[in-house]
Image (cartoon, rainbow, N blue to C red):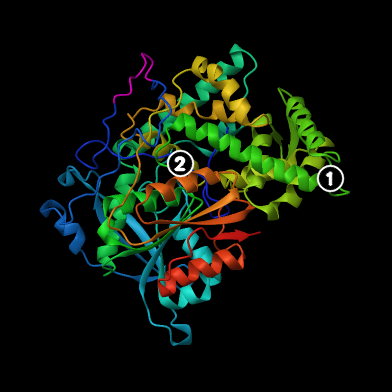
Amino acid sequence: MPAPFRPAVLAAVLLLAGCTSAGRATLPGDTTPHSSDGAVATGAAADPGAVSALQPLPAAVPPALARYYAQPLDWHGCDNGFQCTTFQVPLDYDHPAGGDLTLTAARRPADGAGGRQRLGSLLLNPGGPGGSAVAYVESVAGGYQPVVRAAYDLVGLDPRGVGRSAPVSCLSGDRMDAYTAVDTTPPDQAATDRLVAADKEFAAGCQQRAGALLGHVSTVEAARDMDVLRALLGDDRLNYVGKSYGTLLGATYAGLFPAKVGRMVLDGAMDPSLDAYTGNRTQAGGFETAWGSFARDCASRSDCPLGSTEQQAGQELDALLASLEGRPLPGGSGRSLSRAQAVTGVIEALYAEFLWPQLRSALSAAKGGDGAPLLHLSDAYYERSADGSYPNLMFANMAVNCLDLPAPFSSPAQVAAALPAFQQASPHFGRDMAWMALTCGYWPVRATGAPHTIRAAGAGPIVVVGTVRDPATPYAWARSLAGQLASGQLITYQGDGHTAYGRDNDCVDSAVNHYLVEGTTPAAGLSCPK
């Protein structure tokens, strides 16, 4: 079954993350009760005005951590001309003598084109949680904004638990195939039992394979790792571009180390003041908005397989999904397309307009009895390989999300009670997204975070970019984060799709590039047309 969030190598996804417990970052303690079967009880919706703010860490490096900040980096050639390195961080920053993790980073040195002076390193993060920043920087560096490539070493750091940095693992490929196919709108008790069993199997697999690491993949710990790398790179301040969940990681860094923030761009922003229930529900609304944009576009075309109006398109989608309840379509190569995978395929295509033609074609094929194109989109969401293997994307995604915030639901009964609110937010996807959120209810490690605001007082200007019809990070989240930050500056993109920078909108790209290279803060209230 899909996690409702995916990283931004294509389009960044996320769940809501919080912060670690007292002694690391000053936040409300985790008082969330656990049920008798190990599930976490539902948290209440958070009011940004009622939650505590993330407090900065002391400016001086604690003596117990000094050795991590002094280690040399040994860069070597790797991966088509990039340079790679590894370095050590403590598994537990509160108890650094308890063992280390090895993290991997990659970089493309500044090319100095046009005689432009090097400004330092620019860390890039694609989101997730679970997206590999190493793979991302290696994928996008060659096509990155030329003025930025000239001035900065482009650096990707795989966060702890992700990619090449002590990756979390949970299930084999065949068991992930089963997990992604489980019905996320169970019609009866037997189907509900199968969904719960799949959630528990996933959680138990993570515990068995990841061990102690499972309790130390929080966003706060990942942000602290970034500060170690900043120092090892020789940069006084961290320059950073984060997309989707990468905005939460960057904002968390700013909250913990405001005096060390350089030029920071947070594109497709998350709102740290929301709890997981509210975040999942409002994100469902984001996908509903994106579906409306797709449906209107489709209905205007002669080849639309869903009718000639937005309403007809929605009815046709509902009918198709209903037809898959217990009756999967052939998906090719001996596989089949379940209802859950069909929903995942649709969600995947809503992240970017360039996928809309593929979605029209896939829906047309599914209506004709061929599930392979929609299954291909679902596989792309999970980054499933043709050989049936999966990267650790969704394993890390769930591990970080379940540690960062208390679970929104602890039982099927709580999900059922929430269905009206989720369906009101998203008539087409609300039920699925409510049931998807149950996995963390059976997580074996207690959540260490809580909803909070991030002010980062003392940091320089931080640019937040929000897209008005963003499916995964609703525009309201960008407005909220920009308002929380003491130096937040919001750029609004009046368009569709997930994130905006680097998607060929001259207004957005020019404003961000001038900020990154020249230090020029975008005009207040900047709104960029599609």
The residue segment tinted magenta is 31-38
Give the left or right position of residue 113, taking residue 528 as reference. Answer: left
Query: Of the residues under marks 1 and 2, which one precedes in the sequence?
Result: 1
Main secondary-structure element of the magenta-colored stretch = loop
Q: Is residue 37 magenta?
A: yes
Residue under the image location 69 percent in, 55 percent down: 354
- The image position of residue 2, as x and y in percent, is 57, 35
Q: Is residue 304 above or below residue 140?
A: above
Q: Is residue 28 above or below residue 112?
A: above
Q: How many marks?
A: 2
Q: Residue 304 — which label?
A: 1
Q: Is residue 288 visible?
A: yes
Q: Is residue 35 magenta?
A: yes
Residue drawn at (55%, 27%) of the image: 434
The image shows residue 286 at horizontal and vertical percentages of 59, 40
Residue type (three-letter) at the residue carrying disc 1:
Cys
Mark 1, other Cα within 10 Å: few <14 / some 14–19 / many ≥20: some
Q: Position of residue 222 (x, y in %)?
A: 33, 49
On the rendered structure, is 334 left or right of 28?
right
Q: Secondary structure at mark 2?
A: helix
Q: Closest to the observer: 473 or 365?
A: 473
Taking the spot 83% from the left edge, 39% from the top edge, the residue there is 309
Secondary structure beneath dot 1 equals loop
Q: Amino acid at mark 2?
A: Asn
**In this picture, residue 497 sits left or right of residue 393:** right
Query: Viewed as shown, does residue 452 lie left or right of 463?
Result: left
Front residue of 48/375: it is 48
Pointer 2 residue = 397
Using the image as rendered, state which of residue 210 and residue 374 is in the foreground: 374
The image quadrant of residue 451 is top left
Q: Quadrant of the C terminus?
A: bottom right
